[in-house]
Image (cartoon, helix red, strand yellow):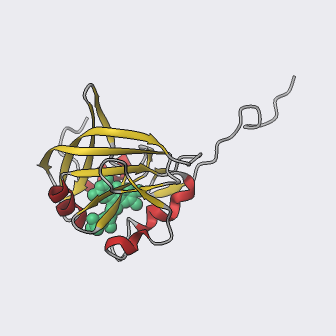
């Protein structure tokens, strides 16, 4: 087995096979901001904590450091356009970025929540530390709930997949006997 260090490109291709959900993380630095994120990880249940990993070159990093709070909308398949909008480097900055989407202020922090999301989490940042070319934000979940979404949006091999559930009994080839 080769025990040498691997490359970022090899890691990117390898991790692309790890299927994730997709979120939009919102926060506020005087204007509401959002960014598409799939690095959401559940860290601890007691206390309830999650983590997001944000690239050091991301403009959202400064917003998150200033606000010390963020809100996560776990996207449904119907929010595929939000996933692409908030991943685009040329999207409008500020509240115009949310035009065309149904959003409501979160109950405690006031950051936008997509009403068609699967679930949402309001988070207060507890720690932010640099790791390689990303900043890791560990946060206490202060509230969470369900949106109107039905089917989760998935991300795999660089492609957004509005996964449709297949009912048991209708999948696969017909069975004989
Ligand atoms: C499905 C998907 C997941 C992403 N996840 C992350 C992530 O976890 N962390 C991150 O920093 N960027 C992530 N990105 C890239 C950012 O959304 C993208 O670079 C964005 O333009 C950054 O915006 P900003 O510079 O305004 O912060 C993801 C993009 C996509 C399409």
Between 77 and 122, the one lying in front of the other is 122
Give the image location of residue 156, x and y in percent: 46, 50
Say above or below: 167 vs 136. above
Give the image location of residue 63, x and y in percent: 20, 62
Give the image location of residue 124, x and y in percent: 23, 45
Image quadrant where one finds the C terminus: top right
- Residue at point 36%, 77% (across, down): 92
The answer, for residue 9, to whether it is visible in the render is no
Say above or below: 46 vs 9. above
Relative to residue 94, is residue 137 drawn left or right? left
- Residue at point 39%, 75% (across, down): 96
Number of marks: 0
Toward the right, the furthest residue is 177
Relative to residue 147, is residue 33 drawn left or right? left
Give the image location of residue 31, x and y in percent: 27, 69
The answer, for residue 115, to whether it is visible in the render is yes
- Residue at point 41%, 43% (across, down): 18
Toward the top, the furthest residue is 177
Say above or below: 13 vs 142. below
Q: Which quarter holds ligand 1?
A: bottom left
Relative to residue 148, is residue 49 drawn left or right? left
- Residue at point 56%, 48% (across, down): 148
The answer to which image quadrant residue 126 occupies is top left
Image quadrant where one finds the N terminus: top left
Toward the left, the furthest residue is 130
Between 72 and 19, the one lying in front of the other is 72
């Amino acid at each position: 087995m080769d025990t040498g260090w691997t490359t970022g490109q090899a890691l990117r291709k390898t991790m692309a096979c790890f299927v994730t959900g997709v979120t939009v993380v919102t926060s506020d630095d005087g204007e509401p901001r959002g960014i598409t994120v799939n690095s959401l990880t559940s860290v601890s249940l007691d206390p309830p904590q999650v983590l997001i990993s944000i690239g050091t070159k991301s403009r959202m990093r400064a917003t998150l450091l200033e606000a010390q709070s963020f809100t996560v909308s776990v996207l449904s398949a119907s929010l595929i356009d939000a996933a692409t909008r908030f991943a685009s480097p040329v999207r409008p900055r500020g509240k115009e970025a949310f035009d065309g989407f149904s959003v409501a202020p979160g109950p405690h922090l006031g950051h936008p929540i997509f009403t068609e999301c699967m679930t949402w989490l309001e988070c207060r940042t507890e720690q932010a530390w640099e790791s390689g070319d990303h900043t890791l934000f560990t946060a206490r979940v202060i509230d969470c709930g369900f949106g109107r979404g039905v089917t989760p949006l998935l991300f795999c091999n660089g492609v957004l997949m509005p996964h449709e559930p297949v009912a048991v009994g209708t999948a696969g080839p017909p069975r004989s006997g």
